[in-house]
Amino acid sequence: TKNVAVLTSGGDAPGMNACIRAIVLACERAGYKIFGYEHGYNGLLHQEYRLLNNKVVHNLIQRGGTLLHSARCLEFKSEESARLAAANLEKLHIDALLVIGGDGSFRGAAHLGRFWKGQIIGLPGTIDNDISGTDATIGYYTAIETAVDSIDKVRDTADAFERIFLVEVMGRHSGFLGLNAALASASDYVILPELFVSEDKTVKDIVLQLNERREQKRKNISYIIVLTENLWPGGITALAERLTTETRSEVRPVILGHVQRGGSPVSQDRLLAVKLGCYAVSLIAKGSTGVMVGEQNGEAVEVPLEATWTQPKLLEKLSVETLETLMNNRYT
Ligand code: ADP
């Protein structure tokens, strides 16, 4: 038999619980003992854990957040911390550690791997989808759904007053969430890091588009712009002010914020979570280590942890093409 530990780290994402459940059940089937470390890497440093079993994960698949809680743990970057974590894992005779998190968490896992001989397997959990080696990450689809739902509501009020709204979505430094939320909500313009040319070009495009609409005398038309966080110099307020001046209409900023991290996971996230959870457990018997599990074109894959943050991840090609056809963005 083997002892397996799991933790959730970094930004939380809907579907992390579904993933924990699948890991626990798959471990029980394999006859492994399963430990859950709390609060990300902090739990490893403070030997804060609990034993998990099928009763603990009953009625859990649909719940947002994470049963094990997540956290940042800046001190984990030191060699001393990684050695302490390794010693704690050895005390519990852990054979394999499964880390559900984003690229920061995987850097942490690789760091630990330099001081601990056990198996380390990462599972991609982040709403940003900014991890190479997997088509999607656990939490991504739910975040799109949440953003779309909010933008639909903004659209209702925007239409009523023929207003221009600027909506900021998450994504860290990636445009996956912005691109797909904009497409699915029929937004009018989207500002994404991957396709960003310049501030002037963006503002010019929007003003041109609005002037065309005014010339057509289209009535009762609202205009919604989606903006990815961390992109605009000076932030969303600076852009809203500039657009208010240049369009001669009041532009209202809306920051969707942390609601995008919450909620019950949609089916796509639950499915990805359970598939990757089971696959990760199956790799323990195989001896895999220093890898992340992912899904590419419907197939389970293992990729080296380092590739998840060193390889660039490109936006879905078909979504970009659709954007160019349907929306008012002009990138040339
Ligand atoms: P995410 O996993 O969502 O990208 P963070 O970037 O906050 O979230 O990383 C989560 C945690 O992973 C950090 O709080 C830290 O404990 C650990 N971590 C991140 N980068 C490193 C690193 N270079 N070395 C060691 N640990 C790291």
Image (cartoon, grey):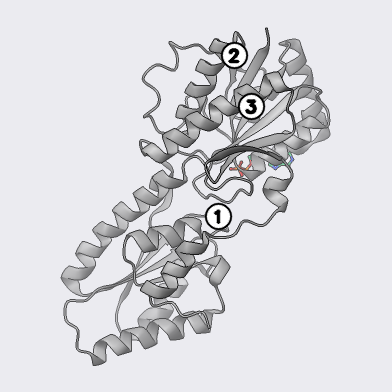
Question: Nearer the N terminus, badge 1 or badge 3?
Answer: 3
- In the displayed structure, 216 sits above or below 307; it is below
Label 3 belongs to which residue? 98
Residue at horizontal 53 percent and vertical 13 percent from the top: 52
Please, which residue is most extreme toward the bottom here?
215
Q: Residues within 10 Å of mark 3 (few under 14, many from 20)?
A: many
Indicate the amino acid at tag 1. Arg
Residue 78 seen from this side:
yes
Question: Nearer the N terminus, badge 1 or badge 2?
Answer: 2
Q: Determine whether the residue tagged by mark 1 lies in a helix, strand or loop.
A: loop
Indicate the amino acid at tag 3. Leu
Residue at horizontal 59 percent and vertical 14 percent from the top: 34
**Tag shown at residue 32:** none
Residue at horizontal 40 percent and vertical 51 percent from the top: 144
Residue at horizontal 56 percent and vertical 39 percent from the top: 299
Residue 233 seen from this side:
no
